[in-house]
Image: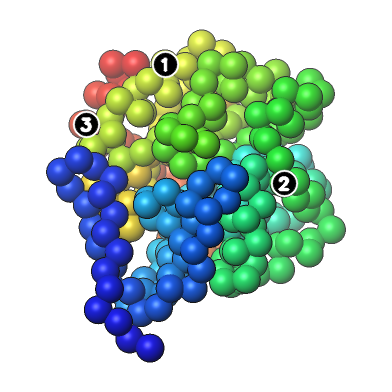
Amino acid sequence: MSTDVWLNEALYPAWGQRFLVKRELARVQSDFQDIVIFESFSHGRVMVLDGVVQITEADEFVYQEMLAHVPLLAHGAAEKVLIIGAGDGGVLRRVLQHRTVKRAVMCEIDGEVIRLAKAFLPEIAGDAWNDARAEVIVGDGIDYLKRARHAAFDVIIVDSTDPIGVGEVLFSDSFYENCERVLTPRGLVVNQCGVPFMQAAELRETSLRRAKFFPHVTAYVAAVPTYVGGFMTLGWAGKDASLTSIGVEEIRSRATAAGILGTTRYWTPEMHVGAFILPPYIAAVLDAA
């Protein structure tokens, strides 16, 4: 039934966005956060955590493709991937598209996010939940990382909220120190670092922390319509600086071998390479880190 109810997202003190709600599908107060899923008139189904929009059916492909495909194709031979957060399953789905991946461990602290995503956003993960290569853990990714053995993973992908509330510990010094220990010699970690037009401090401070433990720190960008404020930055910390300077044709070759070329709606070899060419206002934030 149609309504005239609007959901207002006030992520920034003086700027936000709103969605006209077609119907509310779920509202749950978990042990960690308030979760709302609703059907919008403009963006399909939407998941909101603590009042902040996390994902919409309409544009999730932009964020998910860039968060998963860029690090895996840059690495080129990733077999073991750790995903922290990403309870909707979209990152897991994209990681498992890669033929090289033999094991993908996903740690989501809030089991209610997984349950509700399965019930109300099933297309985002598709069949990823049932893939034999996937190990889905409802638990603390920080604790899992602390206990993981040395050089256990080739790539770590962090899909978290901003560094407040349940996501705050994923931006700490100890977290990145453990990432460095757990990664293989060519390993890398990526995570969302906010919209620098409005959240420059998030990118700058996270880059400073990463640089304490990794020799190569940078960021790449993706234009996600729902994340208001311009480009979203995806932070990068790696052990091999050459992985961010691979050319278009080599990336195309790797994507073909991996089995993803032609399957994406945002990522392309050209977008991959171009994403590391930062606008000056974003580059300046990194330079200040």
Residue at 73 percent of width and 62 percent of height: 129
Check the image and report above or below for 108 versus 286: below
From the image, which quarter does the C terminus lie in?
A: top left
Q: Position of residue 97 (x, y in %)?
A: 67, 59
In this orientation, which residue lies closer to the viewer: 47 or 231?
47
Pointer 3 residue:
280
The outermost residue toward the right is: 132
Q: Amino acid at mark 1?
A: Leu
- The secondary element bearing badge 1 is classed as helix
In this orientation, which residue lies closer to the viewer: 220 or 138?
138
Give residue 138's mark. Answer: 2
- The secondary element bearing badge 3 is classed as helix
Q: Position of residue 141 (x, y in %)?
A: 67, 35
The outermost residue toward the top is: 212
Q: Is residue 69 in view?
A: no
- The secondary element bearing badge 2 is classed as strand
Q: Amino acid at mark 2?
A: Val
Task: Tell me the quarter of the picture where residue 194 sits.
Answer: top left
Q: Mark 2 and mark 3 in contact? Answer it, CB < 8 Å.
A: no
Q: How are the colours assigned in the image? A: rainbow
Q: Position of residue 33 (x, y in %)?
A: 51, 47
Give the foreground label among 1 and 3. 1
In this orientation, which residue lies closer to the viewer: 52 or 211?
52
Pointer 1 residue:
208
In this orientation, which residue lies closer to the viewer: 195 or 109?
109
Q: Amino acid at mark 3?
A: Pro
